[in-house]
Amino acid sequence: MNRYVNWAILAPGRIANSMATAMNGVKDGKLPDFDGKKIKLYAVASRNKEKAEAFAKKWNFQKSYGSYEELLNDQDVDAVYIANPHAFHHEWVIKALKKGKHVLCEKPAGCSKKQLDEMISLAQEKGLFFMEAMWTAFNPCIAKIRSVIKSGLIGDIINIDSRFCNRNPYDPNDRNYAPELAGGALLDLGIYNIYFSMMIADFSPVKKISSAVRMLKGIDAWNGVNLTFENGIQSSFQSAMDLPTESGSHNAVIWGSKGYITVENFFMAQKAKVYLYKNIWGGESDLIEEINLPFAINGYEYELAHSNDCILKGLYQSDIHTFEKSENLIETMDSLRKDWKMKYPWE
């Protein structure tokens, strides 16, 4: 069995810099209980050779390529982190799998369930590891929150509220406003609200969906969504491209029958507070516990280390962020887009 994985990054943009930071930190032993020698920073590919060379030099990768095809043709590449815009994920995941590479693909892995199913099917056929890079699934703070909920401290979960709204004024040249690039708030931001809700609802199936949307040039600039899970838990959230939140943060509140939990920046949670109601009206509450679990590096390290271990164990899917969870996530987003009559040009 191999003792390490040769990692490559396809498309060295902003989010790839975050993953490269995590890769270097993990390799240097900054993630407790993980052997950094199991990770090798091997190659990077951009459509611009100079950009690839600069990225490789900055982040200590051995090789750089001026095309994605060259990288995939390198037989020494074991696994590829795909970091280009999500409209291109399907194409390059399929090409990477066909070349025999394990794949960790930025979220959303597919822009529709049809795309995702094709990726999963090919990964299974090839016996290769494939996972959507949903870092929320591996967040230590959220794991702690879920353990508090499981203990029954705040009673039965009733509702989950969250907001993920950023103000990016309309720009026709911005990919986030381009239908042909699968722009819009849902796939870029709302995906986190949905997955966070699924985690807190213990992945109970979604039973009912209702929503409102404000469309702009063919994409959802703002949406408000209500989910009802089979176990009775409800979630209400908003995501937006052109409106900020009042405080500039992206917080969530988990409401229980005995108390509630506030989560600061839920999509990258590192802090939360647990409260219990002081009276039956709930107007006053006692702070019972403060959860403070900062990332070892920047939050990307957990999905990276998990993927690395799965690959070395010969697994083709994660036992944490499974294919089924990715499918349930994209099915929910497909349902919302269907209600909004929002289709991408290629559909």
Image (spheres, rainbow, N blue to C red):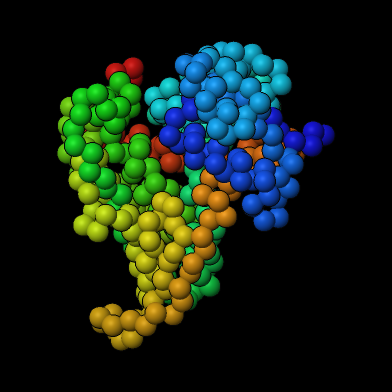
Which image quadrant for residue 261?
A: bottom left
Q: Quadrant of the N terminus?
A: top right
Tell how many labels. Answer: 0
| Residue found 58% across the figure and 28% down from its top | 57
Estimate the x, y position of residue 44 in percent, counting from the top left: 57, 24
| Residue found 64% across the figure and 52% down from its top | 31
Left or right: 36, with 159 as reference point? right
Estimate the x, y position of residue 97 in percent, counting from the top left: 60, 21
Q: Quadrant of the C terminus?
A: top left
Can residue 211 be seen?
no
- Examine the rendered structure and indicate whether residue 6 appears above or below residue 319: above
| Residue found 46% across the figure and 76% down from its top | 289
Out of 48 and 226, give the one closest to the viewer. 48
Question: Which residue, as the protein is rendered here, is positioned at the far bottom?
Answer: 279
Left or right: 231, with 169 as reference point? right
Can residue 173 be seen?
yes
